[in-house]
Image (tube, rainbow, N blue to C red):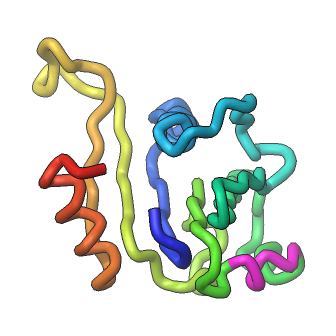
Amino acid sequence: MAPGLKIYLRGNLGAGKTTLVRGMLRALGIRERVKSPTYTLVEVYVISKLHFYHFDFYRFRDPHEFLESGFRDYFDGQATCLVEWPENALGLLPEPDLEIELSVATAAHEGPAAGRVAQLSARSEIGDKCLTTLREGCC
């Protein structure tokens, strides 16, 4: 994960957004409890020099709540930001580098790895590099 990376997670309740973030943090060496930020709106993790912000905007009822929260400063290019429910701050968040759409697997997806389906889309050059790294199995 690179500083400044913005990843937006989309999917219905129970699709696995927080579970995916937990897995990413575990892979980066976080051993502390990884909580959902549903009520706190943000959970902060520091990995060496990397500041990692996990946001959940599920409870926002108006996009302007993002501005009122003061979170805009977190997206200054110095930290990695993962955002659940980015559509609830529609038009006020910076463009993501990577979007991940999660869904519960349907019968068409069932098999040995049935569970969740993730569709990853790069939205910037850094997002393209991230997907290339994932495809090469280097992460």
**Residue sitting at x 54%, y 78%:** 4
Q: Position of residue 110 (x, y in %)?
A: 15, 18
The answer to whether any part of residue 54 appears in the image is no
The residue furthest top is 112
In the rendered image of this protein, does residue 127 appear above or below residue 40? below
**Looking at this view, is 62 or 130 the one in front?**
130
Q: Is residue 52 left or right of residue 24?
A: right
Say whether residue 90 is magenta.
no
**Residue sitting at x 14%, y 26%:** 109
Q: Quadrant of residue 36?
A: top right
Q: Is residue 98 left or right of residue 136?
A: right
Magenta span? 69-74
Q: Is residue 22 left or right of residue 123?
A: right
**Residue sitting at x 63%, y 38%:** 30
Specify the principal SS of the magenta part.
helix
Q: Position of residue 7 (x, y in %)?
A: 47, 64
Considering the image in quadrants, where does the N terminus appear?
Answer: bottom left
The answer to whether any part of residue 101 appears in the image is yes
**Looking at this view, is 91 or 123 the one in front?**
123
In the rendered image of this protein, does residue 68 appear above or below residue 58? below
**Residue sitting at x 68%, y 64%:** 51
Q: Position of residue 67 (x, y in %)?
A: 81, 83
Q: Position of residue 136 (x, y in %)?
A: 13, 54
